[in-house]
Image: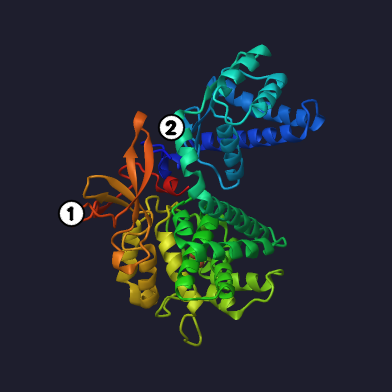
Amino acid sequence: MASAIQPGRGDFRSVEGGDSELSKMGNTLITKFHVLMRLSHIYDSKNIALRQFIQESLQVLNTFIEKKGYLSLKIVADDIFLNEQRLRYSIEGFTSFKYLLTQWKKRLIGEVVYKGPLVEDSLRDFIYLLMELEEGREENATLFHQRLMGRGITSIEVNPLEVTEREEGVATLAKEDSREVAKKVFFETIGTVKEVITNIKGKQQADVRRLKRLVRKAVHLVMEDESILLGMTTIKNYDEYTFNHSVNVAIYALAMGRRLGFSRGVLSELGITAMLHDIGKSKIPIEVLNKPAALNEEEWGQMKRHPITGVEIVLNLKQLGEVNPKMVIGIFDHHLKNDLSGYPKLFHKKGVSLFGRIIQIADAYDAMTTPRIYKKVPYRPEQALAIMLKDRDVHFDSILLKMFIGLVGVYPIGSLVLLDTHEMGIIFKTHPDPQWVERPQVILVERGKQGKMEKRLVDLTERNGQNGFKRSIVKILDPNKYHIDIAKYFL
Ligand SMILES: [Fe+2]
Ligand SMILES: [Fe+2]
């Protein structure tokens, strides 16, 4: 899979900046295409509901074309480019992205360019002709183009999917299966957390049954192979911080719980607790949450109340079923710190609960390694771990912290490293045998043909034939300096 290592494009800052409007527009467009393609399966081309949707879609498409002069959608590996800019999908947009990518790839269509505004007939014909293409047929792009011309549609250009993408796609498909499941669970969970939080904000009934179901699936995945979900935590989605953060904290907590030997039942409780640990923040005004400057006293007061508000909310959640005290206390405890110097203030000093201690570590690590409005360049994984180790006695349970470091690795998953072969690599999976902590699996960051980045997995325990190893890690690098979007390697 090629990655978008493009200066000023693949990294977070670019998305926050100038092209976020394009990104939004792109998401709307992709969703429209997704619905149109689906509707074409259900309705014949004369259907009234379809017509209405085509009209709506035309408005969006034509506004874009009028503004930019043309509209091009191009698939490069697993990315969609809108007028040469890589689109970053929103959490809600994930399904639509996936659908468009799969449908176009199956038909070996790689690019479509609309060179002028469309009318109802041309958009309808475009969608139906596209979906009628036989899967896997080499000449599809040419055929498609000829058929469009046959209908008098000359303003749409179609290009085939690039060869290298196809070969890679087929080869990696089989082994990517559980990764696909993990991705689905991950994004669905973020969407569900978002729904729950939004409902609580709007004082509506929040349905947590779905969340419970998803947590059970996540538990299953973590039991099978923790590294897959751990890899997903590198997707630091800036716009969706709260939801993304909740899910990441749950993943770290689950992986820790698993190493502590928790049963599936206890793991599910831990997962839900971690997922809801910041639910009390839903009662804090967004201006306070996202304030770029330091908080004043009153705002701090509001912030410090969120563990208690969280407890109140969880106790009132119907459908959560039996609420185990461990869950409530875990939420209450998560900012207490190891020496009890955190908040809320206690009348009776007692230690932090086990759930609380686990969540403290997961919470701190994820918060530090994620870009925020008030800290746009986050700490790198190894920096965050170093800071946590320094203050360990104040903040954390040091035994659990050691275990956490073992979990994310001496070289944490998602770190960019320099190898003694002068290659760059991204830590993909820690070695299951502790004697090889310094020899994880690494994805090489390589420049392939046409300057595109490609993905190759190597094992650092591989020997070189003499007495040494083929590759060893020299040092950790800063991905921002190299414009590398780490998350791309885990999707
Ligand atoms: Fe919190
Ligand atoms: Fe948190």
- Return the residue nearer the eye: 415 or 222: 222
- In percent of the image, x 72 and y 28: which residue is there? 54
- Return the residue nearer the eye: 270 or 183: 183
Q: Residue furthest front?
A: 465
- Circle 1 crowding by C-alpha within 10 Å: few under 14, some 14–19, many from 20: few
Q: Position of residue 335 (x, y in %)?
A: 47, 72
Q: Is residue 194 visible?
A: yes
Colouring mode (rainbow / by chain / secondary structure / one colour)? rainbow
- Return the residue nearer the eye: 464 or 24: 464
Q: Which residue is label 1 attached to?
A: 466
- In percent of the image, x 29 and y 55: which residue is there? 460
Residue 306, quarter of picture: bottom right
Residue 10, quarter of picture: top left
Figure check: 22 above or below 202: above
SS under mark 2: helix
- Would you say the beta carbon of the disc 2 residue lies within 8 angstroms of ligand 2? no
Q: Is residue 233 left or right of residue 132?
A: left
* Tag count: 2
What is the quadrant of the N terminus in the image?
top left
Q: Is residue 69 left or right of residue 388?
A: right
- The amino acid pointed to by label 1 is Gln
- Circle 2 crowding by C-alpha within 10 Å: few under 14, some 14–19, many from 20: some
Q: Earlier in the sequence, mark 1 or mark 2?
A: 2
Q: Is residue 283 visible?
A: no
Q: Which residue is label 2 attached to?
A: 164
Q: Which mark is residue 181?
A: none
